[in-house]
Amino acid sequence: EMAKRLASDGYRVVFISARFPGSEREEKYSGYTIRRIGNLKTVYFFAFFELLRVRGAPLIVESVNAIPFLFTLLFPVKKVRVFYHVVPYSAIREKVGNPILSRVVNFLQLAVAPALYRGKVVTISRSSMLELRALGYRDVRVVKLGIDLPAPKRAPRENLVVIPGPLKPWKHPDMGIKAFAALPGEFRLALFGNYESPEYEAYLKGLVETLGLSGRVSFLGRISDEERDELYSKAYLGLVPSEKEGWGLVAMELQSHGVPVIAFRVPGLVDSVEDGKTGILVDFGDFKAMGKAASRLARDRGEWERLSKGAVERAKAYGWDECYAEFKGVLGSVRRRSG
């Protein structure tokens, strides 16, 4: 979204990314160029040679997800590093698999990158800003993460609760399922997104059976954006039981559809969910408190209406154009300093 707006403003933008099955090596999209190289692991090596091709560029914007592109330090141009959040070690361990390599990735994230990098840093929430500053990054600025604001729609609400994916252990959908069990029998639960593994899929579905919820819970798998929006337009509540988020994009997307969110009081979600105004926050891991909050809103339609209206109003401040204006301001300040 930022890249296509930069291209529309006359910037030449080259987006370097990993390849995936069936992808083109290079293509034009929304006015900017996408170059795909390597895979999710080898892209960190091959990207160096791609940057040699565009070394005359006045600015490198690096999107960081745990593993930094440290070789960008070799390029004598201005840089902006964009962090969505500091990835918890539990997530790295689950994703990488190898315990030694997991520790290496975590060390790069927590110690090596902060020691070497001294440029402008952008992140998407106050929680992440404080965490990055604690690691040693100094010049950190928050730029709001935009959402696609839905058109007003008056679809009738159903007794439907949604837990957005992906369905990963550190997202704790199992706690959300346990919280849902406290709701009256007329309520249904829908979970969507990719599973961490076949074993984790079996665990979640086994939990549903153990709790006697088989007839009330649906696992939708990966769904399209249109299907997701249709689901949100009908939902009564959203549960977001993550242990940490960079911002809580799924929470904001739910709220933009007027769905109050019940989440844990953790970094990121304390920024995206306003407790008592757009949703309800409870202590991390307390799925019983999450269930009680959901049950209260199931009974109290007036309270639900108040939170729903607050959620819609809050979301209006997060359109992409407004967020792009903030991001462009950061890029402008970097380029002025370089001049």
Image (cartoon, helix red, strand yellow):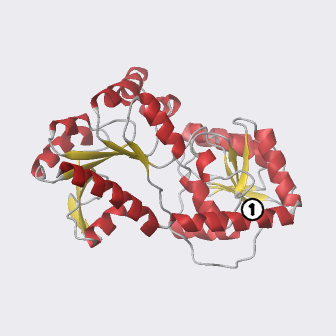
Residue 18 vs 101, above or below: the answer is: below
**Residue 317 image offset from top left, x and y in percent:** 55, 65
Q: Secondary structure at mark 1?
A: helix
Q: Can residue 15 be seen at all in this image of the molecule? A: yes
Q: Quadrant of the N terminus?
A: bottom left
Residue closest to the far top: 100
How many numbered discs, if any? 1
Residue 308 vs 84, above or below: the answer is: below
Q: Residue at x 19, y 49 (%)?
A: 338
Q: Can residue 235 be seen at all in this image of the molecule? A: no
Q: Quadrant of residue 241?
A: top right
Q: Which residue is mark 1?
A: 307
Q: Residue at x 69, y 36 (%)?
A: 284
**Viewer-proximal residue among 339 and 252:** 339
**Residue 133 image offset from top left, x and y in percent:** 44, 34
Relative to residue 219, is residue 194 drawn left or right?
A: left
Q: Residues within 10 Å of mark 1 (few under 14, many from 20)?
A: many
Relative to residue 40, is residue 264 drawn left or right?
A: right
**Residue 101 image offset from top left, x and y in percent:** 37, 24
**Viewer-proximal residue among 146 and 171:** 146
**Viewer-proximal residue among 115 and 141:** 141
Q: Quadrant of residue 297?
A: bottom right
Q: Residue at x 28, y 51 (%)?
A: 17
**Residue 331 image offset from top left, x and y in percent:** 30, 55
Q: Residue at x 85, y 66 (%)?
A: 302
Looking at the picture, which amino acid does disc 1 mark?
Leu
Relative to residue 337, is residue 187 drawn left or right?
A: right
